[in-house]
Image: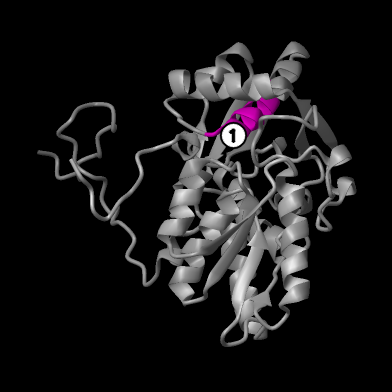
Amino acid sequence: MDGSPPQPMSPHSGSNTQDPPGRVPRRVDSITDLIGNTPLVRLGRIERECPGVELWAKAEYCNPGGSVKDRAALRIIEDARARGDIKPGMRLIDSTSGNTGVAYAMVGATFGIPITLVMPENVSAPRKQVTTAYGVEIIYSSPFEGSDGAIRLAHKLVEEHPDRYYYPDQYSNPSNPLAHYHGTGVEIWEQTGGRITHFVTGIGTSGTVMGTSRRLHEYSTSVRCIGIQPDDAMHGLEGMKHLPSSIVPKIYDENVLDDTIWMTTEDGWDMAERLAEEEGLFVGHSSGGNVAGALAIARELSKRGQSGVIVTILCDRGDRYFAPMKWEKDYVW
């Protein structure tokens, strides 16, 4: 023995490896303390078709509520509590297509705030069941009006019952992009060592793309920030907005972005399948659209003989779009 400390083995070098020194799981006081600081995963197989370009994806499904929306929900509720906006006896109400609802439900349960969610009746069954498990009240809007119908119904309910509801309105609330300005953007810059050249992600409420892009542009004006929109009003990329046919979120500012990519539903779904089969990443279709957009940029850079470090967002897991067995307290075999 030469007296030198043992070196940690590669995680791929065997099944009897020891944990590297100093790696102790975090101990936290609340589940909300686990929101943020998500991993950045390299898409090594997919990037092979674009020599010279690195493709990275931020695994936002690692948030405790299972999606990128945990960040915005936490910041929105924390800021509202700090201002005293949520009075005793009031319920927080907001419109959502699913993920923000789960996030509100989790954070609301943590702080003891009752939650009412307005969502289209045709959102996926898992989202309905998960939010219900947290004890929230769900009010369904027309399945034919999408997220805009939920927004209109939420406005109507608040106007009719102003003393019952606190309405943060995630589409207009500056706390939404601020969650990413102070969180996601900082993390991406640090995780890439400031090497990022492109950030690309889909537009829904626009909080993620607005807040992250503003922060990255402050770090370096050479970072190109690109938004992704579905190419058709009748699309199947749940969570994304086709802005020409939708109510444009007040927090959205097209001047923050350097470009926009128009994504087909088929390309988003196909890439979600590729991510599962080639990278072991089982994610939703909006995540597939995000990676498809990042790959399109990577191909163009590689074609021109340019290098790049492209980062996108994996919004949630694919099992959120399944129709699982119903969770019943009394199950009859």
Quarter occupied by residue 226: top right
Q: Amino acid at mark 1?
A: Ser
Report x, y in % for residue 42: 51, 30
Question: Does 12 appear above or below 204?
Answer: above
User: Left or right of 31: which side holds 167?
Assistant: right
Q: Can see residue 321?
A: yes
User: Left or right of 244: which side holds 323?
Assistant: left
Question: Does 207 appear above or below 304?
Answer: below
Report x, y in % for residue 220: 77, 47
Q: Is the residue marked by circle 1 packed among few (<14), some (14-19), or many (20+) residues within 10 Å? A: many
Counting every numbered tag in the picture gives 1
Write the residue at 48% across / 40% down. Answer: 320
User: Label 1: which residue?
Assistant: 287
Write the residue at 60% across / 61% down. Answer: 117
Write the residue at 23% across / 45% down. Answer: 19
> Does residue 54 show up magenta in the picture?
no
Write the residue at 70% across / 71% down. Answer: 167
From the image, give the main secondary structure of the stretch colored magenta: helix
Report x, y in % for residue 289: 65, 29
The magenta-colored residue range is: 284-295
Image quadrant containing the C terminus:
top left
Image quadrant containing the N terminus:
top left
> Does residue 288 show up magenta in the picture?
yes
